[in-house]
Structures are given as structure tokens and as C-alpha cells.
Image: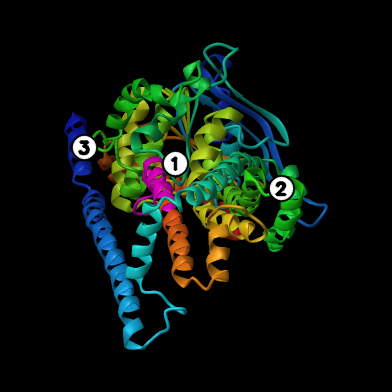
Amino acid sequence: MVQPTKAVDNLISMKSDAAVEDSATPLKKRRSGGRRRTRRAVLSILTGLLLWEFSIPIFHINGLVLSPPTKIFARFFELLADGSIQKHIFTSFSQFALGYIFCALTAIPLGLAMGKIERLRDALDPWISALYATPSISLAPLILIWLGLGLQAKAVIVALMAFFPMVINTVAGVDSVTKQYEEIALAFRASRLEQFVKLVFPGALPFIFAGLRLAVGRGIVGVVVADLFGATQGLGYLLIQASQLFNTVDVFVVTVILAGMGVLLTLLLGFFQRLLCGWQSGT
Amino acid sequence: MNNMNLPSSAEESSLTDGDSSIIIQNLLMEFEIPGSQGVLRVIDDVSFRVGNGEFVAVVGPSGCGKTTLLRIIAGLLKQTSGEVSVVTESPHTLPRLGFVSQQANLYPWRRVIDNVSFGRELKQWNGKWTAPWKRKKIRDEVMPYLELVGLKDFPRYFPHQISGGMQQRVNLARALAINPEVLLMDEPFGALDAQTRENLQDELQKIALSSDASIIFITHDIREAVYLADRVIVLTPRPGKVRTSVRVPAVRPRAPEYQLTEEFNDLVRLVWHDVHGESGRQ
């Protein structure tokens, strides 16, 4: 009968579906768009550094107020060469890493649980809102009194700073998995565990990554500020010493190291996000 | 009216338990009205049967509880009272229900092929837990379903990279991949453009015959109902009751030209009057 040829016709017409071409072109554009974005970012940074460098001689700015980038980088390599800065970087980084990882391991499961279990959310929401609004750093002196000036205390302060963006974003991520998606899983008789593994977690993942990125910044602030309340080594300690001696260059060096740390960690997270949430590109 | 417009009870009596695949008896569904003590009756004493391999379309004015009815059968809602039973191969297994929603609702983080395999990965249909790294075997198993809906060239695409019509094909393939005994379809083509809808209607006819699943197809489009179904059940405005059950005698699959025949247009007119009958006079 007529049917078989019809079927073939349909198959052919589907392949040439206009939408396919629509989606194929942006794919290419996106890739070159990424390169363009990197180029603009690098150009912007270089321009900024140049303006900074040359504004100092042009406007006769005092060296105590502002140091030129060349001097900052020279000083950084000088400190690296005489080996005096490594231990401070290592101290601060291990404080940060310990606190951050500990925080992620508690905040993300807690956020997932709060997103799924209404009672838990109702019970914890007021605490989270209240503690998020208070500057967690005001607890830093207390924590130093309790735990001393060592690794533990600093890691706890980092964790405290990083905690809220992680929890709040994870809860938002669970909420982003809408009822319609859940309904499909239910209609297919997915068990609770399967719903969690195949639906809630992958759906919440982009938000979890957003939380992790925000937490990097807050965690680094935590490391430095904790040192302000008492420290024997670390980048914050170095910062206080330099500022008390009006050593502007060293203040800038420490700041640049901290900024670099933040950038590197954010890039690393971005890499993992692209690896795990590839579907997000172009949405 | 002519004799095709049988009251539902007379129609049902021709089906016995043996060749029924879905039996719905005295189904009643009420929702609480928000902010008051009252209840809203959405489905009122609905009974009908669907035969093995039968294609039943349910039509009715909007708000008559069509979608609610389907959601109850799918197990997404619990009825207030009444019975819904889906006959299975063995009494101990859950019925294999394929669900096709109006919006494709594909998981955006899964590629097309992994969306199709979603149901197949579940313990319920696979018999065991599937580790994510063992998905390849399931991907291979579900590939024929992707082919069946005409998307064999798109397994690696993400849902946002394909058109709405293609997404709806994936939605259909996802339901077919668990090899359903019963296919529940909630206005699956409602959100598509006319051309895509026609293509998919013809695809569905072929798929329906090759899979021998029983189908309940909810639609507000009377022509679509008559074109596709063995039987069209018309619900009254809220609360939904079965008003009539109209048999469409033409053999499936039907060519698109069937929609030009007098028989088709007579049936459409008949159903149209049943749908609009009371609501038209209100």
C-alpha cells in the first residue's frame, strides 16, 4: 500500500528538519565566542595594568600610596627567590583548603537534605537566614579563643565563611528541579534513591557549582581576616606586618597572591563544571 | 442520532475481563477548594474499559478532568474513590505504563539517547540497579526506539539543541523504551505546529500497531481523536462523566486521506455535538 513509502518520506523529512541546522550553527559560534571572550579578558587586564603603571609617573603618585605593577611583580619574585614567602602561602592555602573541603562535605549534603525534606528546611531556614545576615567574621575572635591560632581555628573560620553560599545555592538547586521533571520520574516508577541520583543531584549540580565558586571568594576573605585577629604566619599575618611598616609594595604582593589564588581556584571549578555539566553550554 | 452513538454502558458490555487491558470503575475525584471547606468534583463516576491493543481517545471541553483522569491511571494522583486496574502479564508485576506528557520535559542534563534510556535504567524495568558507567549497554538497547521515532542521527544532542517536535519524539521514544503494555498520552501533540503534528500522528499510528500497546490518548482536538482512535470517549464538562463512546470503524493505520472521507467528517460532527452539546447551551 501507500504506507511504506510514506514512512520513508517522513524519515527523510525529519533529517532535514530546519531546527537541526539552527542548533548546529550556534555550536560553532559558541566555540569561537569562547576564544573571543578570553581575548577580551586578557586585553582588558593588560590595559588595566598599563594604565596603572603609567599613571604613577604621570600623576606623580607617592610610592607609599601606590606601587606600580612592575615593582609588585619584581618584589614577588624576590620574595619567592629568598624563600621567605612560601611558608606563608603554604600556611594560608592549607588553612583554606581544609576549611573549604570540610565545608563542601557538610554544606552540600545538608543543602540537598534541606531541599528534599521540608521539616528540616523549616527548622533550619531561620537559622540560616539569621546567621547569613550576621557577619560571620565577628565570630572569628571567639573561634580563635576556643581553638587557638593554629590550623584548626583558621579552617573553621574559612568553613564558616564558605558555608552559607554553598548551602543556600544547593537548596536553590534542588528547588530548580521542577515538579514536571519529578513527575516523569514518578510516572516511570523511579525509586527515591533513583530520583535522587538521576534527577535531584544532576539537576542541582549547576547551582552547587555556583555556590562553590562564590564560596572561594568568601573563604579567601576568611583566611586573611582570621589572621588579623592573631597569627604567627600566613598571608594575613604578612599583610598586617607590611601595612604596619607602610611597606606598600608588600601589601600589594600579598593582595595579588590572594587574588591569583581566587582566580586559579575559580578556573579549576569552571573546568570541573564544564566537565560535569556540559549540557549547560549555550543555555 | 445514529446507532454509532452508543451509551457507554452498552459499549462496555462487549468487552470482557479477559481481553481488557484497563478497567476503570466508578472513578470519582474531588479536590479541596483552596481556602474553603468545600470540594470540587472533577471526575464523577467514570467507568470504561480499554481492550487489549485498543487505541482510545478521550475528548471533552477544557476543565473536564481529562488530564486528571490520565494522571490517576498513571499513578501520579490518588483517586477519591473507585477502581482503576491495569491488567498485567503476571499479577505480581507492576503494569508497564509508558507516560507521554504534553510538554516533553526531557532532562536537560541528559543527551537525547540518555533521555530515551531513562526508564530502562530504573530498577523497576531493568530488574537491577544500573551503575552510570554501565549505561552503554542500555544505550544500545534503546537505540531502535530512537530510530523508530526518526531520530537515529541525534543521540548525542542535548534537548535544548533540538526542536520542539523532535523533543516530543524523544518523549515518545522514552515511553516506548520500557516496552509498555499501556501507553498513556496527555495531549502529546498539543504544543506542536500543524505540520509536525501531522507527521507525528502518522508515526504514532505505525508505532501503535507495531508495539501492540493499549493506548489512552487525551486530546482536545476532535479531528485528531477520530483520526487516530478505535474509540473516542467524550467527557462532559466538569464534573467529567462519560457522555458517549463513539467507535471509529476504519481499520488502522489510516492514511491522511481518511480525513477527507465522508465517514470521517460524519464522525467528527457527531463527536463535536457530543462535546459541545451541553456546554453550548449553557
Q: Nearer the viewer, residue A283 or A207?
A: A207
Q: Which residue lies under the disc numbered 2?
A: A148
Image quadrant holding the C terminus of chain A, namely: bottom left
Which kind of residue does numbered mark 1 sit on?
Tyr
Alpha carbons under labels 3 and 2: distance apart: 72 Å
B218 sits to left or right of A145: left
Residue that appears at 35% across and 82% down: A56
Q: Is residue A226 magenta?
A: no
Residue B16 appears left or right of B256: right
Q: Quadrant of residue A137?
A: bottom right
Q: Which residue is mark 1?
A: B107
Nearer the observer, A229 or A133: A229
- Residue farthest bottom in this picture: A59
- Give me the disc on residue A114: none
Kind of residue at badge 2:
Gly
Q: How many marks?
A: 3
Where does the N terminus of chain A fall, quadrant-wise? top left
Q: How many residues crowd around disc 3 within 10 Å: few (fewer than 14), some, or many (20 or more)?
A: some
Q: Which residue is mark 3?
A: A11
Q: Residues within 10 Å of mark 2 (few under 14, many from 20)?
A: some
- Image mark 3: chain: A
Q: Quadrant of residue A260?
A: bottom left
CA gap between label 1 and label 3 equals 25 Å
Can the viewer see residue B108? yes
Query: Gap between marks 1 and 2, in whole Å?
Result: 49 Å
| Range drawn in magenta | A265-283
Relative height, residue A229 to residue A166 (above, below): below
> What is the chain identity of the residue bearing mark 2?
A
Q: Confirm whether residue B1 shows in the render.
A: no
Residue drawn at x 51%, y 51% is A88
Q: Amino acid at mark 3?
A: Leu
Circles 1 and 3 in contact, beta carbons < 8 Å: no
